[in-house]
Amino acid sequence: MKLNKMNNILLKNRIKRPDWLKVKIRVDDDFKATKHLMTTQKLHTVCEEARCPNIYECWSRNTATIMILGDTCTRSCGFCSVKTGNPLNIDLFEPIRTAEAVKAMDLKHVVITSVDRDDIKNDYGAEIWAQTINEIHNIVPNCNVEVLTPDFQGHVPALEKVFNAKPEIFSHNIECVERISKQVRKQSDWKRSKNVLKLSVERKLVTKTGMMVGLGETDEEVIDTMYEIVDLGVGIFNIGQYLQPTKDHLKVQRFVHPDIFKEYKEEGLKMGFKVVESGPLVRSSYHADEQAHQYNS
């Protein structure tokens, strides 16, 4: 791959965000309607909490990634802008409100994610996860449910609760290459994340993961990581550019050129992934409905 020369140039000029990362702000009626619905249903979205650059595009398409189990995470990953602290008690009515919001939006595909809830010692929030999936399936039976879960501390009974609710797509992100994982997300474990994906594949679920670039990895490490993940049987892989959300988060080490993202995609499809979404602004749930369609076509 002819990647290193271009990336070395980008490394020298990493202070200024390149033009290809500029986002068009579009606040139309659909955007406002999505925001109003999330507010009235007292739901959180990762779109807002994680400062996703695609919020204007996605909300204008009547799509949003709903974040359950509150807006406060028990972990403090170096890349993530979701607030850290002591979360509130579990909201037992959240699953039904989430399903009602999905119904109101008339969604055919929804992505559900959550903060880490290491404070819930029995199952790390897995029961609410399962109830949410079941409520959506019951109230909106024609909607596919894609979940983007935490690792539940690798606790297999907790994972089984989610698996048994049979989401149409199970996703859990490895986030970065293994070498830099501990500095990127100190309270997580790369091999544990890999095992979560392995268990999902073994349960015959369509399995998806994603990672960021620009955190100090090399292109060779990106490709090696993709090989390691495809060997598990994971079918969908996402790669996007890391963007520093605040001055207190990890600094961007490089801006990867769109042409290199195209090479990642080409290599990923060659090695056996059924779907690869690769681009500077790609995030975990970006065009998730289209990815599901590609996978099933």
Image (cartoon, grey):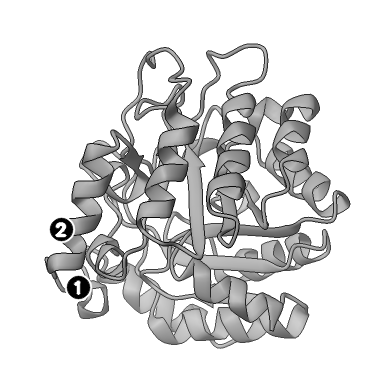
| Residue 242 in which image quadrant | bottom left
Labels 1, 2: front one: 2
Q: Which mark is residue 22?
A: 1
Quarter of the rendering occupied by the C terminus? bottom right
- Three-letter code for the amino acid on which mark 2 is drawn: Lys
User: Is mark 1 in CB contact (under 8 Å) with mark 2?
Assistant: no
The residue under label 2 is 32
Q: Residue furthest right?
A: 202
Badge 1 density bin: few <14, some 14–19, many ≥20, Cα 10 Å: few
What x and y, as percent, mark residue 9? Answer: 34, 78
Q: Residue at x 66, y 19 (%)?
A: 123
Q: Is residue 204 above or below residue 129?
A: below
Q: Residue at x 55, y 60 (%)?
A: 143
Q: Which mark is residue 149?
A: none
**Residue 18 shown left or right of residue 68 in the figure:** left
Badge 2 density bin: few <14, some 14–19, many ≥20, Cα 10 Å: some
Q: Nearer the viewer, residue 229 or 68?
A: 68
**Residue 228 shown left or right of residue 11 in the figure:** right
